[in-house]
Image (tube, rainbow, N blue to C red):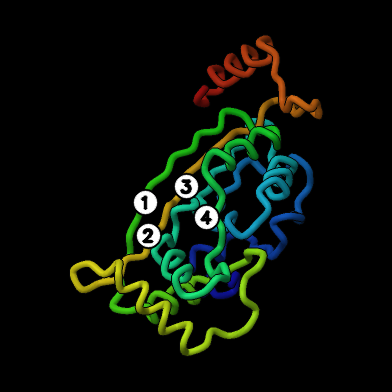
Amino acid sequence: MLQAAGRQQPWLRRFARVCGDAGRLPFGDGSVDLILSNLMLQWCNPDQVFAEFRRVLAPHGLLAFTTLGPDSLRELRSAWAAADSHPHVHQFIDMHDIGDALVRSGFASPVLDVERYTLTYLDVRRVAADLRATGARNATMGRARGLTGRRQFAALQTAYEAFRQDGRLPATYEVVFAHAWTPETDVRRSSPDGASVSLDHIRQQLRARRRTGRPP
């Protein structure tokens, strides 16, 4: 993928490209100022990945990312539920739980928002083909391990038809947009009540952001 990116986007050749695991980033502590992540986190354990993001980001570093929320592919999930008893669609994490995970990992001033987008297709096969092309997979526990049989797929097609509008089948995506900052000092706490931050520390952070022009 990194080689393909360099071929398709010549300007990327100016930058070093590194292949690594999001849960074990090949970078030193506090070594980067900015992390951008686009539609990757939904396949990961957010606590593990956010902890790594927090580790490699320098003080006042920025994390900005998108991920998918639980309303994504709701039509496909409903149609599969009518076809058999196995979970065929990945269970995406709610925006509020993502925000909680950011706070647990020590990020400051998290801001999250959500938008819904609907793609339309002629038939279910094109929905499935588009998902495969994006590399999407179902990592849900209890998912079916074998290939989908003809009867199952026929049942899926029949159930999905209930969503057809204006001759097209919809596929909804709930996209979560988020960003958060790393504080000047580590404010994470191991108390059973979760993270706690003093008022003096918050005032210091606000003053520092005003001096640097960063948003409070």
Q: Element at badge 4?
A: strand
**Height in image: 12 above or below 47?**
below
Q: Residue at x 49, y 71 (%)?
A: 134
State how far apart marks 4 and 3 are (Cα). Answer: 10 Å
Neighbour class for label 2 at 10 Å: few (<14), some, many (≥20)?
Answer: some
Q: Element at badge 3?
A: strand
Closest to the camera, between mark 1 and mark 4, is 1
Q: Are marks 4 and 3 in contact (CB under 8 Å)?
A: no
Q: State which tag comes first along the sequence, 1 or 4.
A: 4
Between 176 and 203, which is closer to the camera in this rendering? Answer: 176
Q: Which mark is residue 176?
A: 3
Between 152 and 1, which is closer to the camera in this rendering? Answer: 152
State how far apart marks 1 and 4 are (Cα). Answer: 16 Å
Q: Which mark is residue 56?
A: none
Residue that lies at the very extreme toward the left in this rendered image: 166
Q: Are marks 2 and 4 in contact (CB under 8 Å)?
A: no
**Dot 4 corresponds to which residue?**
38
Q: State which tag comes first along the sequence, 1 or 3.
A: 1
Q: Position of residue 138 (x, y in %)?
A: 58, 68
State how far apart marks 3 and 2 are (Cα). Answer: 13 Å
Q: Residue at x 47, y 72 (%)?
A: 131
Q: Which mark is residue 172?
A: 2
